[in-house]
Amino acid sequence: MPHLKIAPFDTSLIEQKMYGDAMFLFHAVALNEKEEILGIRYKNEEFLLQLKPGEKSYLLKYDKVTRPLKVNLLKEALHEVSVRLDADVLSSNITIHHKKPPLSSRYFKKIDEFENIVYPKEKISVEVGFGSGRHLLYQAKKHPDTLFIGIEIHTPSAQQVLKQIELQNLHNIWVVNYDARLFLEMLPSNVCEQIFVHFPVPWDKKPHRRVIGKGFLDESMRVLRKGGRLELRTDSDTYFWYALETFFSVPQTKVEVQKNQLLEVTSKYEARWRKQEKDIYDVYVTCMQQSESKVHQIDFDFHGIKYVQGLEERLATDAIVFEDYFVHFERIYKVGNEGLLIRCAFGSFDRPEHKYLLLDTKGCRYFASSPVKTTVNFNAHQKIAEYLNHV
Ligand SMILES: C[S@@+](CC[C@H](N)C(=O)[O-])C[C@H]1O[C@@H](n2cnc3c(N)ncnc32)[C@H](O)[C@@H]1O
């Protein structure tokens, strides 16, 4: 990843050197750590750059949380900042390659795009944890009138399937690289034909990490249209019985079970189990009723919260843990005398959000973008707001 090594300089002069510069937003200095941060706006993107002092040089590099997707933009910005700071560059790995960045396909959708997305097809099906994508690609080819949304947490698998979509010239697949348990919340009610969950990781030792759970089931029933189906296929006896118990906990359901049924397409994973003559179970849960439409009433505003003197000394440094989520103020930076930048982690234990909060005497906001609009993030946000108001 792009970085520059520059000769040590007096960082208290940063404001002076970047004064009046459209790309410079603020300079933040970590409390208790040797690290400084520059808030940058470059070509309409806001992000942070880190400045880490070493023995004989400073490292100027990108910040993981706010990193823009376009690596070339980041490289240009690093170069620009070094020029404006008049820095003595000792070494650099910045060469601009004009190759396509990974996950740049138009079929790749970021989770937050779903807040205002337009669906190109009336029929929608979802596949959770598509792995090699064999089943997803097969379904999309077979049903060109349906949009298939594939959700995969493992980035290389998502990249592989994006390549296949281009190679096979398919236009009805979207790939989302996210946790399926949180993704369904982003979909409207009553829109899905099918939700496929094929060979989910059984997580025998950590059952709380399983995709199928009460929350996932409720959300599946909300997004499925009446008559639509959630389809689980598994080779794990434990997962099969666990899923049945979960499915039967819903008051009104139609559950069907099949054993060792052959499908038209077999994934690599399934082929392995078949060779070992393992039993394979299919469980179909049909949605029996129309759900109410979902109203997104989530806003990440801080409603008048501002920086007050000494706030940095009163903030909890340990994670604050609630039943389904947590809030952790991981690192605190001073921005001048009357402002703070706080790096926080919060939300679900499995897929936490990492964000910066920027506070001054006028207000408070997430820098550079708001969290994904999931209920768990919203609950955590409300706790942060409540906490900042009282601390
Ligand atoms: C055992 S593999 C099965 C892959 C594929 N469905 C098949 O039948 O070959 C499970 C897949 O689910 C993905 N996965 C696990 N947890 C997930 C989650 N919470 N959200 C999305 N994908 C997940 C894994 O990365 C992995 O690719």
Image: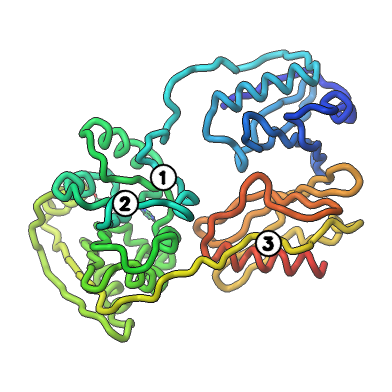
Residue type, numbered disc 3: Ala
The CA span between labels 2 and 3 is 34 Å
Residue type, numbered disc 2: Ile
Marks 1 and 2 in Cβ contact (< 8 Å): yes
Query: Where in the figure is residue 250, as x and y percent of width and height?
Result: 32, 82
Earlier sequence position, callout 1 versus callout 3:
1
Residue carrying label 1? 109
Residue carrying label 3? 319
Residue carrying label 2? 149
User: Farthest residue toward the bottom?
Assistant: 251
The residue positioned 11% from the left and 67% from the top of the image is: 259
Label 1 residue near ligand 1, CB within 8 Å: no
> Split into 4 quadrants, where in the image is the C terminus?
bottom right
The residue positioned 89% from the left and 27% from the top of the image is: 16
Q: Is residue 35 visible?
A: no
The CA span between labels 1 and 2 is 9 Å
